[in-house]
Structures are given as C-alpha cells and as structure tokens.
Image: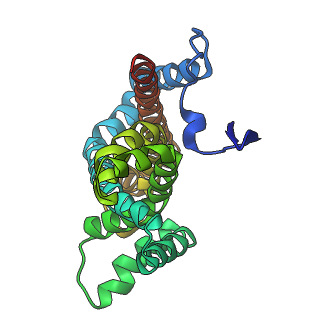
Amino acid sequence: MVKINNKPKMQMTDGVLIPARDDSSIFSAWRITFYGALMALILLITFSPKPYLKILLFLPDGILKTFQVTVISIFFALIIGLLVGLGRISRNIVINRVCTVYVEIIRGIPLLVQIFYIYYALGKFVKISDIRAAIIAIAICYAAYISEIFRAGIQSIPRGQMEAALALGLTRTQAIFKIILPQTVKVVLPPIGNEFIALLKDSSLVSVVAVSDLLRRGREYASTTFEYFETYTMVAIIYLIMTLFFSRLVAIMEERLRTDVKQG
C-alpha cells in the first residue's frame, strides 16, 4: 500500500514475494515455504534417488543457463530502462514521444510473442542465435517496465533539488546525473529487485526457442524417460527455492537501504 497525494493506492506486484520487514517469526510464510521446499528436495533425493537424484544431477547446466539469461538480460534492461526513463521526462518532444510509444508498444505485447518475433520473424532477415534472441527479447521487454520505475523514481525527488542545482550553475543534464540520479538509485533499488525476481521466473519462457535453461533440460529429461510428474516436480521446487532465496536477498537489501537513509 502506497500513498499518492495522501490517498492510499493498492500496489500488486511480484513484491508480494519479498518478506516483510517485521515478518521475523520463526513460522513466517517465507520460512515455511523456503525451508519446506528445501526439505522436500532433500527428502525426495534421499528416499527416492531414482529418479529424483538422477533428475537433479541432469539439471545443473540448465540452472546455470537460467542464471546466465537472467543476469545478462537484467543488465541490458537496466541500461535501456534508464535511457528510456530519462527520455520519458525529457523536454524534447520527439525524444519523449519516441520513448513513450516504445513503452506502450512493448508493454502491450506479451513477452512470449516478443521472443517468437525476434527469433522467428526477424530471423527471416537477420540470423540470431537462440540465446541472443531470448536475451534481447527479455531485455527489451523488461526495459519498458524498468523505465517506468526510473521515471517514477526521478519524479519522486523534490523539485527543489533540481532548482538548487541549477542555481549553483549546473546544467539540467549535469544536475540529473550528479544530483538527481544518485538519490533516485536508493528509491528504485527495491522495485528493481522485484523485477529481477519476476525476470528470473519469466526466463523459463526462453525454453520455447531451444535455449537449454532449467525448464528445457527438464523437458528433455522427461521426454526420454516419460517421468513427467517427477521431473516437473523437481523443476518447480528448484524454481521456488531460487525465487524465494533471491526474495530474501532483496528484502535484506531493502532493510540496509532504509538503515542507510535513516543514518544519512
């Protein structure tokens, strides 16, 4: 719940995965889910190593590929998102409109369609490898959402900061990069952490273009052994553990950020 003009407004995002700051109970929902998933994984590979341990040993390269796609995609999404976010607040009407149209178009097309379009449709004119197509599609898609985070973050900084910087002789561009953006980083870091978690889950879509991520490796194993229930159970548990683990890291990051702000 956030307030805009002193009026509460409900926000529903992947932030619901982030453990609440005051959620320190031993039996908190996050702890029950995370340690429950770990326990389920241990029990499965201990008491039923065939097939669960075999499946687990088959998946590590897929897990690494998932992280590779996620990290590279979020890196480029941050760069593009920052540039588009700055374009969205630009006084240049052409730049502003181009960036706004980009955001509207990308947010209006499902990520899966974008992956197919870059890999198959553009592949008619330019040869793009499967993993590059996946990274490009995810980066472009998430950049549109991250740009809105940057835009909102920049606009949340009091206008007096910009006015003071201009009064000191800085240009508008210098004021943005030297005064506004450093303060914006502290504001946008938590929601960007949420986007990272969402991107980690959406990375499973890259399996449709033959990228050997976690889901793709699971499908390969299941298609050869016909152990679909066991395979997808393991894949689901691993995804759950990864997303909950990173949600805890984001929560720790948010807490340290609040502490730094209070001390500052």
- Of residues 124 and 224, which is closer to you in this image? 124
- Residue furthest to the right: 7
Question: Would you place residue 89 above or below residue 2 in this image?
Answer: below
Question: Would you place residue 245 above or below residue 144 in this image?
Answer: above
Colour scheme employed for the rendering of this structure: rainbow
Could you say where residue 215 lies in the image, as x and y percent from the top left? 41, 52
- Residue furthest to the top: 26
- Of residues 76 and 6, which is closer to you in this image? 6
> In the shown orientation, is residue 26 left or right of residue 2?
left
Name the residue at 42% across, 52% down. Answer: 222
Q: Is residue 206 visible?
A: no
Question: Would you place residue 12 above or below residue 172 in this image?
Answer: above
- Of residues 13 and 104, which is closer to you in this image? 104
Which quadrant would the C terminus be assigned to in this image?
Answer: top left
Could you say where residue 184 lies in the image, as x and y percent from the top left? 41, 43
Q: Is residue 203 visible?
A: yes
Name the residue at 49% across, 78% down. Answer: 97
- Of residues 49 and 80, which is closer to you in this image? 80
Name the residue at 33% across, 51% down. Answer: 175
Q: In terms of image quadrants, where is residue 7?
A: top right
Name the residue at 37% across, 28% down. Answer: 49
Could you say where residue 71 lies in the image, as x and y percent from the top left? 29, 48
- Across the whole image, how many numbered discs are drawn on residues? 0
Q: In terms of image quadrants, where is residue 41?
A: top left
Could you say where residue 232 lies in the image, as x and y percent from the top left? 49, 45
Which quadrant would the N terminus be assigned to in this image?
Answer: top right
Question: Would you place residue 95 above or below residue 194 in this image?
Answer: below
